Amino acid sequence: MQAVEAPGWEDVERPRVIVVSPLAAREGRTVEDHEEYLGRCLEHCLLNGWAPMAGHGLFPRFFPDSDPEQVERCMQAQWAWTPSASFIAIFNDYGVAGRMLDDLRFYRTFDVDIRFIRIGKNKKRKRK
């Protein structure tokens, strides 16, 4: 097996983007609908050459939303990335509500570029 040479820093440098999108079920959409949308948001980032961070999609897989203190720790962990972010991407095809508003309020207290991005709503699919 041939060794693969690691790329140099200039080959992996990408704008670091904090992704904000809906996740909680609301207005007739399920968590699964929003997870599908988050996947599309992440794909959008990657196709644009960005390095996305979406803590709201990562942490709930390991820490339940039923513990408010744990939720707060998870939100603070994502917010800790703010100083190293190139910009904040607010994906708002489904509006901005709930914890997305908390994120937006927090990010507006920093001198960080906030971009509102639309990629289109999920395609409708037949429910089982």
Image (cartoon, grey):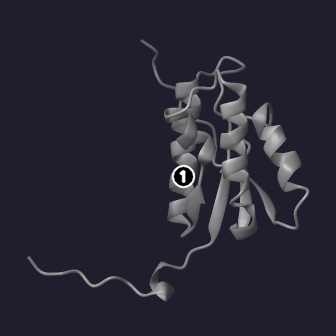
Judging depth in this view, the residue of 28 and 72 nearest the camera is: 72
Residue placed under numbered mark 1 in the picture: 42
Q: Residue reaching furthest top?
A: 128
Residue at the (71%, 57%) spot, across then down:
80
The image quadrant that residue 111 belongs to is bottom right
On the image, the x and y values in percent for residue 47 come to 51, 63
79 displayed left or right of 108? left
Question: Outermost residue toward the left?
Answer: 1
Tell me where residue 50 sits by quadrant: bottom right
**Which residue is pictured at 64% across the width and 20% down the height?**
66
Mark 1 surroundings within 10 Å by alpha-carbon count, few (fewer than 14), some (14 through 19), many (20 or more): some
Q: Is residue 74 visible?
A: yes
Q: Is residue 72 above or below residue 28?
A: below
**Residue drawn at 56 percent across, 67 percent down:** 48
Given the image, on which type of amino acid does mark 1 rest? Leu
In-front residue for pair 71/112: 71
Residue 118 in view of the camera: no
111 vs 124, left or right, is right
Residue 90 in percent (x, y) is at 74, 50
Q: Position of residue 105 (x, y in %)?
A: 88, 47
- Camera-nearest residue between 113 and 1: 1
* 50 or 59, nearer to the observer: 59
Looking at the image, which residue sits at the far front?
Answer: 69
